[in-house]
Image: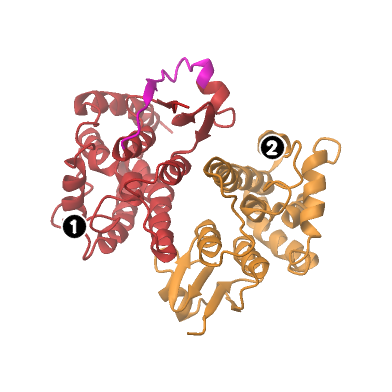
Chain colours: A red, B orange
Amino acid sequence: MAEEVKLLKTWSSPFGLRAFWILKLKGVQFDFIDEDLSNKSPLLLQSNPVYKKVPVLIHNGKPISESLVILEYVDETWKQNPLLPEDPYERARARFWAKFGDDKVLASIWNAFIKQGKEQEEAIGLAIETLKFLEEELKGKRFFGGEKIGLPDLALGWLANLIGVFEEVIGVKLIEKERFPLLSAWMQEFAEAPVIKESWPPHEKLVTKFRAIREPYVAAAAQPK
Amino acid sequence: MAEEVKLLKTWSSPFGLRAFWILKLKGVQFDFIDEDLSNKSPLLLQSNPVYKKVPVLIHNGKPISESLVILEYVDETWKQNPLLPEDPYERARARFWAKFGDDKVLASIWNAFIKQGKEQEEAIGLAIETLKFLEEELKGKRFFGGEKIGLPDLALGWLANLIGVFEEVIGVKLIEKERFPLLSAWMQEFAEAPVIKESWPPHEKLVTKFRAIREPYVAAAAQPK
């Protein structure tokens, strides 16, 4: 039976990119649909009734949601170019950093992005403290996955382009080369790796999008209390 | 080499219980240390420098943090009584529900627990909407893992005792048998399963603990605005 692999994503979603990357890195043939989240397709609503969000991977009619779950599914289903190591302890470490990226890095950077004034200063301080763990983890390694791109690299990959977008919108440098030499080098190497480098959404379009997302927070903070 | 397996937990943590359960279900010999979180041990601080939280599993000197990561590690390291199915799609579903439990069920029930008045009513409504997905998922199944306890059952297992504790503290029934017949039956069967049933912390002690945790929220809501 021919495999039918379909990815529901959006043009800009960093979570969708993870799924896109792993399918490309595995050499899996697939179609993708860029959803319009203001007018979600019946296929999306029916495939992810719990969250109604992208990404959803549909493999031979069976839907899988949640980007980290999709990464593990693809790694287990198409065994070529494994993204997780074989050793259970190394696998646990990879999962730990992938989860840390979503639970802590993303959350702290998002706060730095939407807050204003004194609250933003504090949020930036916390984001930098969080990023220091990544800098530490990269000591002696080229990628979070070791010598090659692994699952935590795909999970953290959004840093490599969205940090630049966020920095441009808020006018503050979050990842400075002097403070984060290893993380900066990783961002550059990851961004330019084969497969990855052809997949980035246009920078200017992202800046416009995230400037609009931030606008209500700026307006709310400017209101008299 | 003799295996050295040590679990850092607390007497009450539902996350610690997950790790405790899986080690027991696998028949792994291990020691555990009940941490006092107001005075964390040097071993805890050194084993989980990122979160400084329990549970931490230390296997032959190597620490693993994050309870869902620990579950996968134990399942991969000791292969007897597998807690995840073999089929990648079924594994993805198991991971999806385990993550849903942490991201949505726990968060929505915690909100229902700490909020007051009108905000609490809304939070209870949202928690019930969230729990309906679990009820739906149990259709035609005895456990979330199918015919036997699996990884999502361990991840969601805290419901089986903490819901009763929360209900007693706030004086509101969250999981009513009439509305959630399958979830209620699952809670009972899970709570009384071998290994699980001997592991529950004392109910009255939990009620006292969570009443104290809720107190500041009650006091804050009672203050004149």
Vertical placement of B120 versus A54: above or below? below
Question: Which segment did they paint magenta?
Answer: A27-43
- Specify whether disc 2 shares its chain with disc 1: no
Asked whether, in this view, residue A179 is left or right of residue B158, the answer is left
Instruction: Give the residue type at disc 2.
Output: Glu
Vertical placement of A121 versus A43: above or below? below
Instruction: Give the residue type at disc 1.
Output: Leu
Who's the residue at 76% across and 68% down the image?
B205
Judging depth in this view, the residue of B182 and B180 nearest the camera is B182
- Give the farthest residue toward the left: A178
Which chain is indicated by disc 2?
A: B
Give x and y (percent) for residue B85.
60, 50
Q: Which residue is mark 2?
A: B137
The answer to whether residue A47 is seen in the rendering is yes
Q: Within 10 Å of the Cα at label 1, are there few (<14), some (14-19), or many (20+) other Cα atoms?
A: many
- Give the farthest residue toward the right: B178
- Give the farthest residue toward the bottom: B1
Q: How many marks?
A: 2
Q: Which mark is residue A182?
A: 1
Who's the residue at 71% across and 34% down the image?
B136
Give x and y (percent) for residue B17.
64, 64
